[in-house]
Image (spheres, rainbow, N blue to C red):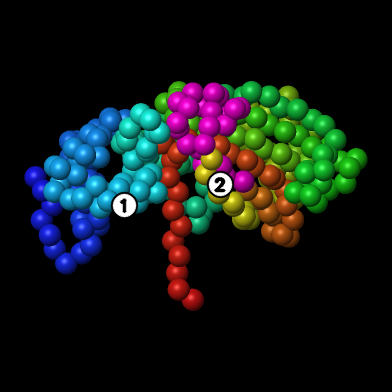
Amino acid sequence: MTIKSDHRALYLQVIDRMKQDIAAGIYKEKEKLPSEFELAKTLGVSRATLREALRLLEEDNIIVRRHGVGTFVNPKPLFTSGIEQLTSVSETISQAGMEPGSIYLSTTESLASEDDIKRLHCNPEDSVITIERVRTANDEPVVYCIDKVLSSKLPEDFLSRAESSIFSAIEESGDTYISYAVTYIDPIGYHEVASPILECDPETALLVLKQLHYDTDDQVVLYSKNYFRADKFSFHVVRKRV
């Protein structure tokens, strides 16, 4: 069926039609789309119009184009979350009706590095604990987490029970409360460490969230670097006029 012309630009109509066909299951997740020639002929548009529509669909992460292979439908993210509220990965997974879990890779203690000193505003002689773990949803790895916190902010026996919640451990004494976080989001392609840990295909993109967590005195108490599978997670922000 060809596109029926209306007042909008033709490429926008192609985008809507492609989204409808994907939602209807005509083109399934991870399925290769027909060639540009075939799609343009089916939709009754020029290949230039089709290419512009495909470019924008790729920007929206609805499709992915693999050079020399073809164009494929991206899986719909299982987890969609706003980042205005500071919630845990476990809560996000639970809200999607799945069972959250953790696989601990390592917990180490060392003197603060140059990066630690900048991020945590600490001294070279301060001790920093680094926790690496994988967050799972129904036993499937979806997030690779690296957390760094000053040893002085944690209970003395934390290393012996490192599988406890980091937030809970930091706030256990009652002297510190994590009030907010400043988040930076970067999309990346294949990552030599995170991608194999998350069992990603080479073409699966990642979203990296770097977060500085602050207490009620506006002091940084925790630095987190989380690698999310982009085919599993999407994030959005509500922006208001002021």
Q: Is residue 200 magenta?
A: yes
Residue depicted at 54% across the width and 28% down the height: 195
Q: Name the residue under label 2.
A: 186
Q: Nearer the viewer, residue 34 or 185?
A: 34
Work out whether 192 lies above or below 183: above
Q: What element carries label 2?
A: strand
Q: Does the magenta stretch include residue 79?
A: no
Q: What element carries label 1?
A: helix
**Image quadrant in which the N terminus is located:** top left
For label 1, the crowd category at 10 Å Cα-Cα, with few meaning under 14, some 14 to 19 and many 20 or more, is some
Q: Name the residue under label 1.
A: 52
Mark 2–mark 1 Cα distance, whole angstroms, equals 25 Å
Work out whether 242 lies above or below 91: below
Classify residue 108 as left or right of residue 61.
Answer: right
Q: What residue type is labelled 1?
A: Glu
Q: Which amino acid does label 2 sit on?
A: Asp
